[in-house]
Image: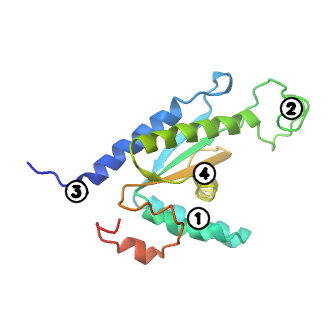
Amino acid sequence: MIQNERETRPVQLEDAVRQMMTAARTAPKGKGLDIIEIAAVTGDDIPVLSEKIKELGEQNGLKFFFRDAGNILSAGAVVLIGTYQKTHGLNCAHCGFPTCGEKPETTPCVLNTVDVGIAIGSACATAVDLRLDTRVMFSAGLAAQKLNWLNGCQTVFAIPVSISSKNPFFDRKPKEPEQAASLSPTET
């Protein structure tokens, strides 16, 4: 049997994304509280995410949202990592308030955000070990948050993932949706 790498890419990508999600899950968490949610976006849901990023770009006027909306269309999957908001009761004041009880509900606990960062780092380290093309995106995470794809998580980041000969997320040039869809296997 001869297996062409181009033909096995979808399976390789699926396995790799699962490993990234496992790395994010097993990452250390403040006080051992596991309030992280992780999901993978694939297939027809990637263009839905792209459209939501564009919508947010129109609302906030930030041009990089449009660039990112085009970039993720080159992804085979997008890993989402987010956290629920829960104070840890440490009264550390890192959030800017003297105690957890004085922190407004709308102000995130800093340890929740740190937990997301550590999980992202673990997922990205796994991607590096597997030689995958990735980029951490605030814009795509915010779009997924607005779509409520992580069931109420309030701090969400996205990691688009690609297996290609050139990292489509590196030089950050936007691709028009019809260009990304028409790329041949040698261009992806």
Q: Earlier in the sequence, mark 3 or mark 2?
A: 3
**Which mark is drawn over residue 7?**
3
Picture quarter with the C terminus: bottom left
Report crowding for label 4: few under 14, some 14 to 19, many 20 or more residues within 10 A (C-alpha).
few
Residue tagged 2: 93
Residues under numbered marks 4 and 3 in contact, where contact means CB atoms less than 8 Å apart:
no
Q: Earlier in the sequence, mark 4 or mark 1?
A: 1
Residues under numbered marks 3 and 2 in contact, where contact means CB atoms less than 8 Å apart:
no
Q: CA distance from mark 1 to mark 3?
A: 31 Å
Furthest toward the left, the residue is 1
Q: Amino acid at mark 1?
A: Lys
Q: CA distance from mark 2 to mark 4?
A: 29 Å
Residue tagged 4: 148
**49 over 12 or under it: above or below:** below
**121 over 93 or under it: above or below:** below
Residues under numbered marks 4 and 1 in contact, where contact means CB atoms less than 8 Å apart:
no
Residue tagged 1: 52
Q: How far across and down, in percent of the image, does residue 100 sit?
A: 84, 29
